[in-house]
Image (tube, grey):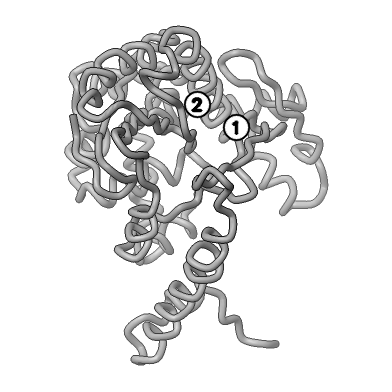
Amino acid sequence: KQRSTAASELAKLTGTHPIVALVIEYREKKKLLSTYVEPLPTQVADDGRIHTSYSVDTAAGRLSSKNPNLQNIPVRTEEGRLIRRAFVAKKGYELLAIDYSQIELRIAAHFSEDEAMIDAFKSGKDIHSATAERMNVERRVAKAINFGLLFGQGVFGLSEALHIPQEDARLFIDQYFATYPKLHSWMTSVQALAKEKGYAETLCGRRRYLAEINGHNAALRNFAERVALNHPIQGTEAEIVSMAMTTIDKQIPEKEAAMLLQVHDELVFEVPKGTGAKMAARIQPLMEQVIELAVPIVTDAKVGPNWAEMTAV
């Protein structure tokens, strides 16, 4: 059997030999070079700008960017942020980015009606810190569990993500579900309902049919079970963002705020220089009031001359 050199496998070997970190770094830089640094300048249009195309991901209802894909411009690494610096506002303008704060977990709180989650959001707490406090664990652990379990991650996946033994991961999961019992009940019931009906549904009624959820192939069945959990949350997020975009388009003239990009839960605008904070104050309420959930919908806004160097407003 051939040994794997996939990034996930190499990551497990970090620290065992100096070459592992160098190979990972080389791959990351090579990917940035071939995916962004080299092709993007060739895709500049006659007006000096890069234009992406959006299509609806029919399964989830999310918008997908292609030719080029501008939803995947890196943000976590220093090299990735350097690429984002190349996305600049035109002369006399600045960029305004507004994103939904922890929207997926807020949707989960709404669906599950879990009192502990709802209380955390209603009191304005950071949900990861609130979870960490309730479970008596570090925030990074709480964050990994909050997002991981919501999208069907099991004991093995959590142990890999946190680099901990599977026994410890199992204890964390049991503790998490004891902390948010109604969330656990909802997760179980939504998968059971999908098996019964053959589809999963968003808040606005968008269905995703899951033919394999009662199938004999274990891998396909497990995937369908994860999608049954994932679709109501990510599909509802897509609906909220789409409604927000439509509302903004109707109520905010393009000359005051031109909508440039949608990156999942973030909208990027180009606004006249010096008006970023004022426009944020107009756009944020439109985004936050587009639908009513059991918990407040909150957004964060940033302004800057380019997509990398932005400050909160």
Residue 180 appears in view: no
Circles 2, 1 touching at the beta carbon (< 8 Å):
yes
Using the image, determine if residue 225 lies above or below residue 297: below
Q: Going 45% across and 27% down the picture, which residue do you hit?
A: 259
Q: Is residue 154 visible?
A: yes
Tell me the kind of residue under disc 1.
Arg
Q: Secondary structure at mark 1?
A: loop
Residue type for callout 2: Glu
The secondary structure type at the circle numbered 2 is helix
Residue 236, by quadrant, is top right
Residue 134 lies, in percent from the top left, at 20, 36
Residue at image position (34%, 33%) is 97
Q: Position of residue 48 (x, y in %)?
A: 50, 47
Q: Specify few, some or many for label 1: CA neighbours under 10 Å numbering under 14, 14-19, or 20 or more.
A: many
From the image, state whether disc 2 or disc 1 is nearer to you: 1
Q: Which residue is mark 1?
A: 62
**Labelled disc at residue 237:** 2
- Looking at the figure, which quarter contains the N terminus? bottom right
**How crowded is the residue under tag 2: few (<14 C-alpha within 10 Å), some, or many (20+)?**
many
Q: In terms of sequence position, does the residue under pointer 2 or pointer 1 come before the other?
A: 1
Whole-percent x and y of residue 139?
A: 22, 47
Q: Is residue 104 above or below residue 282?
A: below
Could you tell whether 139 is left or right of 288 in the image?
A: left
| Residue 258 versus residue 97 in the image, above or below | above
115 left or right of 58 in image: left
* Front-lying residue, 29 or 222: 29
Between residue 57 and residue 210, name the one nearer to us: 57
Q: CA distance from mark 2 to mark 1?
A: 8 Å
Residue 78, x across and y down, in percent: 30, 63
Q: Residue at x 28, y 23 (%)?
A: 116
